[in-house]
Image (cartoon, rainbow, N blue to C red):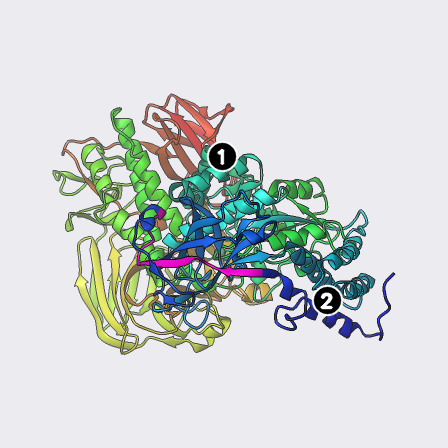
């Protein structure tokens, strides 16, 4: 029986127990103070400092100099290798012996040339176990190497976590010694900790909390820290508490080890490779000791890094994958941003990820795993379903600043109606610690009580890696079925989702995008990364089409599959959820731009070189645009199945010809100065008046006789805002920035004509933003072109400012339309409810449109993603100037183009979608013989269908994969005509797996295809 407390005081009992296990107070006499027994110094410690991240074999050959504990080393991002010689005293026979290593740098222990253990103080890993129970025959003299990275788990922010890294930080090893570890003390401590936490978390309203309180008080009575024989009595009391079971209806927590490793964020890509090594080798050690332990691990790229840098570790991982305990999840190449990558990029995330997992482990992931990104495209459910994935796990919407998302477990229905079973762990974290608090939150926060009785608990240090600890496993092991807490079982995503699906009758459905009401600055921050992404998406698209057609024209052509895979993987890597959003440090930006510019765009071996090789050797041109003059040997080609017009074709940097296609009469351009200094431009479609300061006084759609610019307002108005968020600098733009709007009015050089007449006219002007920043813009009107282009150059040296451009238009509509992956969606232009006004800054891809019946205006862009349309003002977000985590974010020169397109009818009828493609995918000029015959490889009979992708099939040489989608939001039957020698045509999924019972319907006209709104269709064509 328990001894009665002397007084009826909950607080003293609780604090008594807390002090008994405190690592701060009374450690001279409490239980915590007994955790370690004897200690002994190392035989010797020596170090070698390297500015580079070198492999072990190279490090081991270096000269190591004696090193004292406490000596500092650095600077940031360097590596200090330690050679550790130790001798375990023989008198420690039967004891558990640890190397205790405390350092502020992340460390990896190497033994016999192999990585064996990650150590990081922040991740609560400071022990490398040398022996669990020392025997005489075990080696007592051991030499180890410890590789210490000069960065912490979260990099090296100067003053705060997300501040730019301190380049001169010094690091040290504060403790390096041998210790006897008293496992029995640890076990009682864990019992105590769990009970104390139960008392605190269940609070005074729960009977069960008091039972825990009296149990833990009696344990203090029974437990004498100086006498280990007393521990068993305390432990058995704890055990009887923990083993009082729940009723059958209790919620089940599916505990899965996890380690969220950002592929780059506050540290560069190269360090991530080591973070994976350190974290995952530690997971393997835990698996060896804990047979129930299951670990979930996403991002094929990280597996591939470990495969090439730590092959021994990778094969251990392969073994545990086979056992079903180390579980690759997610199916994507990286955990990408959920908003900005193009539709095809998202498909490739799954294609590369699933193929890697299948190749290395023989598995196809059934769940998409994206706990930490800044919103989720409404096309993701269809892309998931097409990639063999029908379950989705995330939790980031718990970060919403305004509205609480109403579900944790629900069906998410995408743009086309595809549904995926979706789970947000109610603990609202992807890095729980297996504590009572995590379990209580998991039950309490569940917004689908009564509908879903299973939840995920992801435990393990994350973001910068680290992963689970033995202590977390010990905590969870104690409370597998303890009355008052949810049931806890070691589980897998598959088990969790199977349970949820089995009992899903009451689940609700959420339709459309999952918009994160936070981090909306990430659509704009780091403009060069966004531009690089768009350009590379375009370039890879064109190379694949060029390569595919070359393949069809010349049987000996070797499609550059390997090079393309390499390029795609780099592009996909840069789409990681802290890189393309621009929320990373400067080093990562440099890496990302190098991947874009160096490898792809400039003269790298796989970049344009590849493209020029293709066109020189194999491309005879297709969908020909006959050039003028007609005897010219250059031809331009289009990569789209719709009609394309262009006014200029560039070749070798020289404007050599102008071409218009299938336009019966070439419209002439008029440019004339008005008496007030404004300029009137007209091309037969549009008539525009540009003020001296470059703003549009008028933009008239001639045939419809409609003015696009709102009465008394100016279009193309640059505006500046103060942009000071609450904390997350690179991430957030807050609602209140809208109150600081200031038009950019100072004219440096007023409008003047750059070129006039012929097929292109343009005017230019320069504005001053501040004494440090200017805007120079060329406004371009092309003959027969339905939109006006604004080629813009900004010198940008601001601090916490936001530059946008506004078009107040003469359109009234409660909704604006934004392009997303393989489609578009509407968002409100009013601020009625909190769900409406929380979307004051939104994302879109190549275009946004505001239409009323029969008339509208579209705003197109070639590398921007941030938009807002409030009432009748359409705004494109151009540049930000945050200072953390990159102190130099967006400083310098920027080039970008946007375009304004008034139109009659709907945007679908007016070909806004095609115009946005034209702006982003300019015609490419190729050289060929003058007598080359125009040729079209593919055409589609419906304007609603976009043929987005043509590539060689992954697994077969003489086969193409085509990806088409319905872009209008309509049900359509269409014919895909081709002049290629197609022998067979099959429907296939996004992983290019075809169903032998699903041949495509081929007729003499072509392939008949049926689409529902926004449906993506993939075809496998056998040549
Ligand atoms: Zn993350």
**Mark 1 surroundings within 10 Å by alpha-carbon count, few (fewer than 14), some (14 through 19), many (20 or more):** some
Question: Which quadrant would residue 802 be assigned to in this image?
Answer: bottom left
As drawn, 642 above or below 400: above
Residue holding disc 1: 361
Closer-to-camera residue (260/819) = 260
Pick the residue in front: 625 or 126: 126
Q: Is residue 199 visible?
A: yes
Residue nearest the observer in this picture, 976 or 12 = 12
Residue at the far front: name it: 91
For label 1, the SS is helix
Label 2 sits on a secondary structure element that is helix
Asked if residue 445 can be seen in this view, the reply is: no
Quadrant for the N terminus, please: bottom right
- Circle 2 Cα neighbour tier, 10 Å, few/some/many (<14 / 14–19 / ≥20): some
Quarter of the image that includes the C terminus: top left
What residue lies at 51% left-to-right and 62% top-to-bottom? Answer: 122
| Residue 43 shown in magenta | yes
- Foreground mark, 1 or 2, reads 2
Q: Residue furthest left?
A: 631
Residue 1013: within the magenta?
no
C-alpha distance separating marks 1 and 2: 44 Å
User: Picture coordinates of residue 330 (x, y %)?
Assistant: 52, 44
Q: In this view, does 744 lie to the left or right of 374?
A: left
Indicate left or right for 429 with 593 as reference.
right
Q: Which of marks 1 and 2 is nearer the N terminus?
A: 2
Magenta region, residue range:
38-56
Left or right of 761? Residue 479 is right
Counting the numbered discs, the total is 2
Question: Residue 746: percent from the left, percent from the top?
Answer: 28, 78
Q: Residue 200 carries which label?
A: 2
Instruction: Using the image, determine if residue 504 lies above or below residue 337.
Output: above
């Amino acid at each position: 029986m328990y001894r009665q407390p002397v007084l009826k005081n909950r607080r003293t009992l609780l604090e008594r127990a807390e002090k008994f296990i405190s690592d701060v107070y009374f450690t001279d006499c409490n239980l915590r103070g007994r955790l370690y027994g004897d200690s002994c110094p190392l035989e010797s410690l020596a170090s070698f400092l390297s500015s580079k991240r070198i492999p072990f074999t190279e490090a081991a050959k270096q000269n190591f100099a004696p090193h004292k504990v406490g000596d500092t080393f650095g600077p940031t991002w360097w590596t200090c290798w330690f050679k550790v010689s130790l001798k375990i005293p023989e008198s420690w026979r039967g004891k558990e012996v640890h190397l205790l290593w405390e350092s502020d740098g992340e460390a990896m222990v190497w033994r016999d040339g192999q990585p064996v253990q990650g150590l990081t103080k922040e991740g609560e890993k400071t022990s490398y176990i040398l022996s669990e129970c020392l025997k005489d025959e075990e080696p007592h003299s051991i030499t180890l190497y410890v590789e210490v990275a000069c960065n912490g788990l979260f990099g090296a922010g100067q003053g705060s976590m997300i501040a730019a890294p301190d380049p001169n930080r010094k690091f040290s090893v504060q403790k390096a010694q041998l210790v006897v570890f008293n496992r029995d003390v640890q076990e009682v401590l864990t019992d105590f900790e769990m009970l104390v936490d139960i008392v605190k978390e269940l609070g005074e309203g729960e009977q069960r909390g008091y039972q825990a309180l009296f149990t833990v008080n009696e344990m203090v009575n029974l437990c004498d820290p100086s006498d280990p024989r007393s521990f068993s009595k305390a432990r058995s009391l704890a055990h009887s508490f923990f083993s009082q079971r729940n009723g059958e209806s209790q919620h089940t927590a599916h505990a899965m080890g996890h380690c969220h490793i950002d592929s780059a964020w506050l540290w560069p890509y190269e360090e991530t490779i080591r973070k994976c090594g350190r974290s995952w080798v530690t997971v393997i050690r835990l698996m060896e000791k804990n047979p129930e332990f299951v670990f979930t691990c996403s991002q094929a790229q990280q597996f591939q890094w470990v495969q090439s840098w730590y092959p021994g570790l990778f094969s251990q991982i392969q073994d545990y994958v086979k056992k079903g305990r180390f579980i690759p999840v997610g199916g994507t190449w990286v955990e990408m941003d959920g908003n900005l990558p193009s539709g095809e990029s998202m498909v490739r995330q799954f294609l590369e990820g699933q193929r890697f997992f299948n190749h290395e482990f023989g598995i196809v992931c059934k769940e998409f795993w994206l706990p930490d990104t800044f919103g989720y495209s409404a096309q993701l459910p269809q892309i998931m379903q097409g990639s063999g994935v029908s379950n989705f796990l995330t939790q980031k919407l718990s970060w919403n600043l305004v509205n609480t998302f109403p579900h944790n477990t629900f069906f998410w229905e995408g743009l086309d109606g595809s549904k995926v079973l979706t789970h947000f762990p109610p603990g609202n974290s992807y890095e729980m610690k297996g504590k009572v608090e995590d379990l209580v939150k998991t039950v309490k926060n569940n917004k689908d009580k009564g509908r879903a009785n299973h939840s995920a608990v992801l435990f393990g240090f994350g973001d910068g890696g680290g992963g689970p600890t033995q202590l977390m496993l010990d905590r969870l092991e104690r409370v597998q079925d303890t009355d008052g807490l949810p049931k806890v079982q070691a589980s897998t995503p598959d088990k969790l989702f199977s349970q949820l699906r089995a009992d899903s009758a009451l689940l609700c459905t959420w339709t459309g995008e999952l918009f994160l009401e936070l981090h909306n600055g990430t659509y704009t921050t780091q403009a060069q990364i966004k531009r690089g992404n768009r350009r590379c998406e375009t370039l890879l698209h064109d190379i694949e089409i060029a390569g595919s057609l070359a393949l069809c024209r010349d049987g000996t052509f070797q499609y550059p599959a390997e090079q393309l895979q390499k390029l795609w993987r780099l592009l996909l890597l840069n789409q990681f959820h802290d890189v393309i959003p621009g929320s990373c440090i400067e080093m990562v930006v440099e890496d990302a731009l190098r991947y874009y510019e160096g490898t792809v765009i400039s003269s790298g071996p796989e970049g344009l070189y590849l493209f020029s090789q293709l066109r020189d050797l194999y491309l005879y041109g297709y969908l020909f645009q006959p050039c003028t003059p007609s005897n010219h040997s250059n031809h331009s080609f289009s990569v789209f199945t719709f009609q394309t017009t262009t006014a200029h074709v560039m070749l070798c940097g020289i404007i050599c010809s102008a071409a218009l296609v299938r336009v019966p009469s070439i419209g002439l351009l008029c440019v004339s100065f008005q008496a007030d200094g404004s300029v009137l431009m007209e091309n037969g479609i549009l008539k525009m008046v540009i003020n001296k300061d470059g703003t549009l006084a008028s933009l008239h759609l001639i045939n419809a006789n409609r003015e696009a610019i709102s009465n008394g307002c100016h279009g193309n108005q640059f505006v500046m805002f103060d942009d000071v968020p609450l904390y997350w600098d690179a991430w957030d733009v807050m609602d209140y920035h809208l109150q600081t709007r200031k038009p950019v009015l100072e004219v440096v050089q007023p409008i003047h004509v750059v070129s006039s007449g012929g097929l292109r006219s343009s005017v230019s002007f320069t504005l001053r933003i501040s004494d440090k920043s200017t805007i120079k813009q060329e406004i371009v009107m092309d003959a027969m072109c339905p939109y006006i282009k604004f080629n813009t150059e900004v010198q940008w040296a601001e601090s916490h400012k936001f530059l946008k451009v506004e078009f107040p238009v003469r359109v009234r509509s409660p909704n604006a339309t934004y392009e997303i992956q393989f489609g578009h969606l509407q968002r409100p232009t009013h601020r009625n409810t909190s769900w409406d006004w929380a979307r004051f800054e939104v994302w879109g891809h190549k275009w946004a449109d505001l239409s009323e019946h029969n008339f509208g205006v579209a705003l197109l862009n070639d590398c921007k993603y941030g938009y807002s349309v409030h009432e009748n003002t359409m705004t494109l977000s151009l540049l930000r100037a945050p200072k953390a985590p990159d102190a130099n974010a967006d400083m310098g020169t920027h080039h970008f183009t946007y375009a304004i397109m008034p139109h009659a009818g709907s945007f679908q009828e007016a070909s806004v979608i095609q115009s946005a493609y034209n702006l982003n995918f300019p015609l490419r000029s190729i050289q060929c013989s003058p007598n080359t015959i125009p040729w079209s490889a593919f055409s589609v009979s419906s304007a609603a269908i976009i043929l987005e992708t043509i590539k060689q099939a992954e697994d077969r040489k003489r086969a193409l994969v085509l990806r088409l989608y319905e872009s209008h939001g309509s049900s359509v039957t269409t014919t895909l005509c081709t002049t290629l020698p197609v022998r067979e045509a099959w429907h296939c999924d996004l992983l290019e797996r075809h169903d032998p019972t699903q041949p495509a319907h081929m007729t003499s006209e072509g392939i008949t295809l049926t689409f529902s709104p926004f449906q993506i269709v993939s075809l496998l064509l056998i040549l």
